[in-house]
Amino acid sequence: MGYLLKGCAAVVCSANVVLRDQDVLVTGRAIAAIGPGLSQWPLPAGTEVIDAAGWFVYPGLVNTHHHFFQTFVRNRAELDWTKLSVIEWLDRIYPIFARLTEEAFYHATVVALAELIKHGCTTAFDHQYNFPRHAGTRIVDRQFEAAEMFGIRLHAGRGGNTLPKSEGSTIPEEMRETTDEFIADCERLIDAYHDAGPFSMGQVAVAPCQPVNCYKDTFVESVRLARDKGVLLHTHAGEGESPFMQARTGMRTVDYLESIGFCGPDVWYAHCWELSQGELGQMAATGTGVAHCPEPVYLVGAEVTDIPAMQALGLRIGLGVDGTASNDNGNLMHCVHSAYMLQCLTASTRSHPVPEPARFLHYATQGGADVLGRKDIGHLAPGMAADLFAIDTRRLDYVGTRHDPASLIAKVGVGMPVDMTMINGRIVWRDGHFPGLDERDLFRKAEAALHRVMS
């Protein structure tokens, strides 16, 4: 089975390469060719020709930080970040998280993945750090089940929290694990689901939640396991916790993590908005990446992450939705626009200029692929995975914008679902539907699961 996208108005191969009036041929899982007049070629048997006139075709978006389970805890007035510090917010929201069941985690994942796919995301990293004892340890397994149903690439970060509240964490006892329990389940999941091969649909990262809520040995053992298994490491850093880490350990978070070896080209941190220029320089020197989550910045009300400085230092940068309890939507496309606009807002306070709008598309595609260690996704070219999305720009919304497809998403924003999302050569969203799935049925089941735990 294959597809020929015929007569695309623009193919945005990458943030720097835009081709006009081209065809895209997909054979199996990969892009076979991009060029004019491919419909004149002898096409493989079973190739479906799709009229793509007016379409802008982009590489699939790559989400480098999310918390799927939080889709059940959003748009709630009692959890308004504008009235709380990060630590106060965690103290209030963690007892709610602790009520979730295995069923709730599964349906929350369904909701999160559906929203991502509708808006052009083809690879998603989820940081699942919430393991209430009553919910069991098969939560990540259920996430892989949901991802397989939709056909989306899932990078699962097995998170965990080990420090008790009596020693300064914000974690309810119901959510706390021992280091041994955490590491054992990480190893189980790696052995069961991690596929490092080309076009892999599932990978696992070792991702202790955050240093402020874990014993040191949790991070030490995470490094040992990940390096032994050849998988990536991830955690939260620079999210308002550094003063607490300084008081507890005598070191701010970046120094603390570097002292453990939790840094390097196989590591990325989420957020990093409170880090100094020196700390960003340390990360650049070790090759540690960043998952920039722009939209929680609105709610936290703290400083805007210094993306121009990160760019100038050569840090690997990807974009993330973050949890929808701190974002309230799970739309990575929206984050591309937000990331650019936030940097424009603070441009006069920066030492470096705001990157060009197309650079923010790069962060959400090739940048994210690099952060996740993927060489087979992130841009469109023959031999790359057929991960892409298409926007039919023959709408009034796009009049006056079509001259610059690479900047469109960051500068103008796209306020509706895309017209098609393809992952690994399979169309998973088209003309407002998930082929082969009943969205109304998925909605009813998710709503029922939500009410059972949140009422």
Image (cartoon, rainbow, N blue to C red):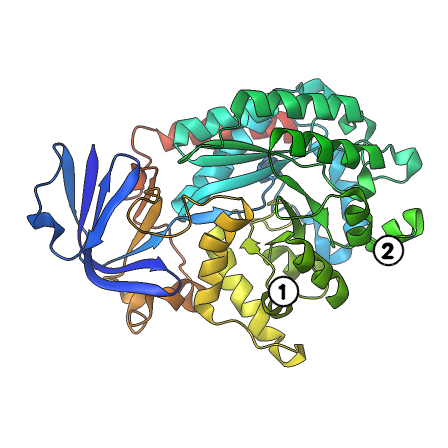
Decide: is 46 above or below 323.
above
- Type of amino acid under label 2: Pro
Q: Secondary structure at mark 2?
A: helix
Counting from the top left corner in percent of width and height, residue 377 is at 41, 45
The residue shown at (29%, 69%) is 402
Please tell me the numbered disc located at residue 310. Answer: 1
Q: Residues within 10 Å of mark 1 (few under 14, many from 20)?
A: many
Q: Residue at x 40, y 36 (%)?
A: 199
Mark 1 vs mark 2, foreground winner is: 1
Task: Find numbered disc 1 in the image and state the secondary structure of the residue it sits on.
Answer: helix
Q: Residue at x 26, y 34 (%)?
A: 28
Location of residue 424 in the rendering, given as x and y in whole percent from the top left corner: 34, 37
Q: Residue at x 28, y 70 (%)?
A: 399
Mark closest to the chain's N terminus, 1 or 2? 2
Contact, mark 1 vs mark 2 (Cβ under 8 Å)? no
Report the front residue among 358 and 451. 358
- Left or right of 167: which side holds 323? left
Q: Quadrant of residue 266?
A: top right
C-alpha gap between disc 1 and disc 2: 22 Å
Q: Which mark is residue 119?
A: none
Three-letter code, disc 1:
Met
Can you give x and y, in whole percent of width and height, for residue 63 in the image?
Answer: 51, 47
Q: In this figure, which residue is indicated by the disc labeled 2?
A: 243
Task: Name above or below for residue 40 compared with residue 311.
Answer: above
Mark 2 nearby-residue class (10 Å; few <14, some 14–19, many ≥20): some
- Indicate the quadrant containing the C terminus: top left, top right, bottom left or bottom right: top right
Please state which of residues 276 and 169 is positioned toward the viewer in this rendering.
276
420 sits left or right of 251 in the view: left
> Left or right of 119: which side holds 297?
right
